Image (tube, helix red, strand yellow):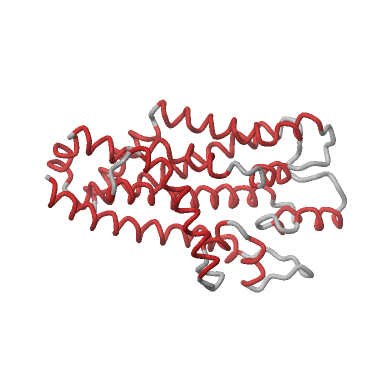
């Protein structure tokens, strides 16, 4: 275990301390600003809160592009190691299990950090002119924010916690797609395919979700996108808006479990690939 943690730290340091990581965080943030810039530029009202612009990013239609940007620093790492032959020397030091598992987990963590930092920078930009929460009366605020994840926290004055959970949830979702990119690159070692594989996975999940009627707590389309339905299915109601910790934490836990399952799958497939090719 200590050896695996050691290699996780090595890969994590390589990822997040690179110029490529910093550039991707900046590009991700600038794209989000671009998606909402006209609203930001043209609306001079202090009544618009940060949540309005976050929803603007969600509904901009640029989610696939943002996803590609977020996983770009790590999507091709395995392909680079494999094609350059460096993987032979790495395996001499780490072993198959440690290499595959640590690479997968650090890919999840670094891609999640990319999104988290980008959302922080985006929020700082918005807050130069707009507040955390709209400056409107309580009744109007309740109707405006209903449907935003964990909106009850906004209504009760816990805006920072609300946004923190939201950023963490988006980061966790990205981490899931990142480890899938690693999984795909181990099966089919192709850089271009690895970069777009999260988008392909998103389309597959959307198709499966519509064909197979899964319960809400297993349906990735509900968990990743429709927070309001999840809130209702866990006992929340529109009439009595209360903060639901299980609704807030469940998407994060769901993604962590999937990341761990995929990490084990990557390890198994990698060991088979190495046995037949090295």
Residue 4, compared with residue 192, is above or below; it is: below
Give the residue drawn at x 57%, y 47%.
167
Residue 207: x and y in percent read 51, 61
Would residue 80 be found to the left or right of residue 180 on screen?
left
Would residue 49 be found to the left or right of residue 31 on screen?
right
Residue 261: x and y in percent read 35, 61
Q: Residue furthest top?
A: 19
71 and 49: which one is in front? 71
Residue 121: x and y in percent read 59, 33
32 and 113: which one is in front? 32
Give the residue drawn at x 82%, y 34%.
43
Residue 253, compared with residue 235, is above or below; it is: above
Residue 87: x and y in percent read 19, 39
Corner quadrant of residue 107:
top left
Q: Quadrant of the C terminus?
A: top left
Residue 66, compared with residue 2, is above or below; it is: above
Give the residue drawn at x 22%, y 52%.
270
Corner quadrant of residue 194:
top left
Give the residue drawn at x 49%, y 64%.
208
């Amino acid at each position: 275990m200590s050896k695996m943690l050691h290699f996780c730290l090595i890969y994590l340091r390589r990822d997040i301390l690179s110029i490529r990581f910093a550039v991707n965080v900046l590009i991700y943030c600038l794209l989000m600003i671009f998606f909402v810039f006209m609203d930001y530029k043209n609306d001079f009202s202090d009544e618009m809160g940060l949540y309005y612009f976050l929803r603007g990013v969600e509904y901009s239609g640029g989610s696939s592009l943002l996803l590609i940007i977020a996983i770009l620093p790590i999507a091709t790492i395995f392909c680079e190691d494999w094609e350059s032959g460096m993987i032979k020397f790495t395996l001499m030091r780490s072993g198959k299990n440690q290499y595959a598992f640590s690479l997968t987990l650090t890919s999840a963590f670094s891609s999640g950090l990319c999104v988290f930092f980008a959302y922080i920078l985006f929020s700082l930009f918005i807050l130069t002119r707009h507040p955390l929460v709209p400056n409107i009366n309580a009744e109007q605020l309740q109707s405006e924010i209903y449907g935003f994840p964990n909106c009850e926290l906004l209504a009760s004055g816990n805006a920072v916690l609300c946004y923190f959970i939201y950023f963490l949830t988006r980061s966790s979702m990205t981490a899931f797609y990142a480890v899938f990119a690693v999984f795909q690159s181990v099966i089919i070692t192709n850089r271009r395919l690895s970069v777009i594989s999260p988008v392909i996975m998103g389309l597959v999940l959307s198709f499966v979700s519509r064909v197979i009627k899964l319960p809400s707590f297993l349906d990735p389309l509900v968990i990743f996108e429709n927070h309001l339905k999840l809130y209702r299915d866990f006992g929340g109601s529109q009439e009595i808006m209360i903060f639901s910790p299980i609704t807030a934490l469940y998407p994060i836990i769901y993604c962590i479990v999937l990341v761990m399952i995929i990490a084990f799958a990557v390890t198994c497939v990698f060991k088979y690939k190495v046995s037949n090719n090295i």
